[in-house]
Amino acid sequence: MKTMEDVQQTKQENVQAYVERIMKIIEKRNPNEVEFHQAAKEVLDSLVPVLVKHPEYIDHAIVERMVEPDRLLTFRVPWVDDQGRVKVNRGFRVQFNNAIGPYKGGLRFHPSVNASIIKFLGFEQIFKNSLTGQPIGGGKGGSDFDPKGKSDLEIMRFCQSFMNELANHIGPDVDVPAGDIGVGAREIGYMFGQYKKLRGAYEAGVLTGKGLGYGGSLGRKEATGYGTVYFVDEMLKDNGLSFKDKTVVVSGSGNVSIYAIEKATELGAKVIACSDSSGYIYDANGIDLETIKQLKEVENKRIYHYLDHHPNALYMEGCAGIWSLPCDIALPCATQNELDEQSANMLIENGVKAVGEGANMPTTLDAIHTFMDNDVLFAPAKAANAGGVAVSALEMAQNSARLAWTVEEVDGKLKQIMKNIYQDSVQASEEYGVAGNLVTGANIAGFKKVADAMIAQGVN
Ligand code: GLU
């Protein structure tokens, strides 16, 4: 006779096989899109317990529908460089899921951008945005345009051309892009200007991350980095730890890194290293953030110029070496797959206690498992870096109300949102029998809200 345990075991195996079948379909339908496969696999594996408990999600083919975007747009972006030559790039926008709100997610301008990158980012955005508790669906976009070394006028012409097509597909209640790697307030400004011109209307809420003088929100620029540190701080506190007197390594030196460094330092940590795509700097005295801001936000210079101001610091070529530095807390804030299993092992050997993902999918699947197997506290990106898009949603709310909140108001809301995300992730991990596994907890908490909305809205 079958015991209850046997029945449960069979259910679990059936769901596992079901998830594997979907994974196969994903791989077949999206050949060679390795980043998208990786992001899907991480989510699908963690959904097994929720699908065992809620077979209605299987009946409604929720997972099959979620992994297929509503639409993926690709388009030609022609522009003229300063020498008068015509250049052509490819533009993308994936509108993945709008069950709980308009598509929302950034635009990335980087030569590595392709359909796989945009789809992994757009897919993750569904769950991240759901976790924020704000009414925003999942989308993402960008281009293989390389902003490095381009003049201001070239950037403007590119942004205008990009928007000439994108404007046909977005709107404050349809799809609301923002920044990501290679897209900051300057690019958003040029795109907003072009959108306004094309529409003949001032639809402030069509883009977020705008300048403060025309509908941007105070605290948006800082939100992703601050949010990551707020989230990690919750996780540390829950485990009897804190940032105080801890040694921290933060990869990257863009918007996320800069404000993660700022907040971690404010909470009493010493940040000893950060990087750019060429290499990393190590400053035993603690990174001087004003120098980094000057180099990266004002002068647009490589990070080794830090040594011009701090000759005692060290510069090393290559990025992965940053994880060989002994630290208590590691915050990968640069880009996808920047922290692999080998780096994870180095960090563990050197006594790392916690890892918080500020970038999107910076840790490989093997490295995540290595951290978990070694009891390193691990804050996954969808939860830990949700602060940026959360404040984007607050920017949309301010634009709709034609109001501007104070920085204290925005930061207070951000802190509360990050706390809620932490608690929701912990609670889901406990409810589904994987207590302490925030990867699974965050995926499940983000998934359920979207899945329930999809069931309520019927098959579409
Ligand atoms: N690019 C950011 C992210 O990965 C922010 C997106 C937004 O604000 O819409 O979440």
Image (cartoon, helix red, strand yellow):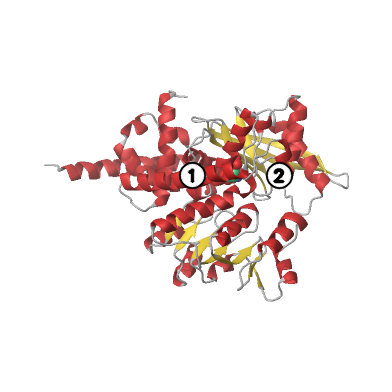
Q: Quadrant of residue 89?
A: top right
Residue 386 in the image: above or below residue 278: above
For residue 347, the mark is none
Query: Which residue is at the front of the view, 450 or 36?
Result: 450
Q: Residue at x 51, y 66 (%)?
A: 343
Q: Secondary structure at mark 1?
A: helix
Q: Please tell me whether residue 210 is drawn above or below residue 228 in the rendered image.
A: above
Q: Is residue 226 above or below residue 135?
A: below
Across and down, in percent, residue 265 comes to 57, 62
Specify the quarter for ligand 1.
top right
Q: Say whether disc 1 or disc 2 marks the residue closer to the N-terminus.
A: 2
Which residue position holds label 1?
Answer: 416
Looking at the image, can residue 360 be seen?
A: no
Q: Which mark is residue 185?
A: 2
Residue 229, image x and y in percent? Answer: 52, 55
Q: Nearer the viewer, residue 224 or 237?
A: 237
Of circles 1 and 2, the one toward us is 1
Q: Amino acid at mark 1?
A: Gln
Q: Residue furthest left?
A: 1
CA gap, disc 1 to disc 2?
25 Å
Q: Indicate the quadrant containing the N terminus: top left, top right, bottom left or bottom right.
A: top left
Q: At x 45% / y 70%, what residue is drawn? A: 351
Say which amino acid is labelled 2: Ala
Residue 433: percent from left, percent from top:
30, 48
User: Residue 272 appears in which quarter of the rendering?
Assistant: bottom right
- Which image quarter: residue 95? top right
Q: List the single residue furthest toward the right.
A: 83
Mark 2 element type: helix
Q: Position of residue 120 (x, y in %)?
A: 54, 44
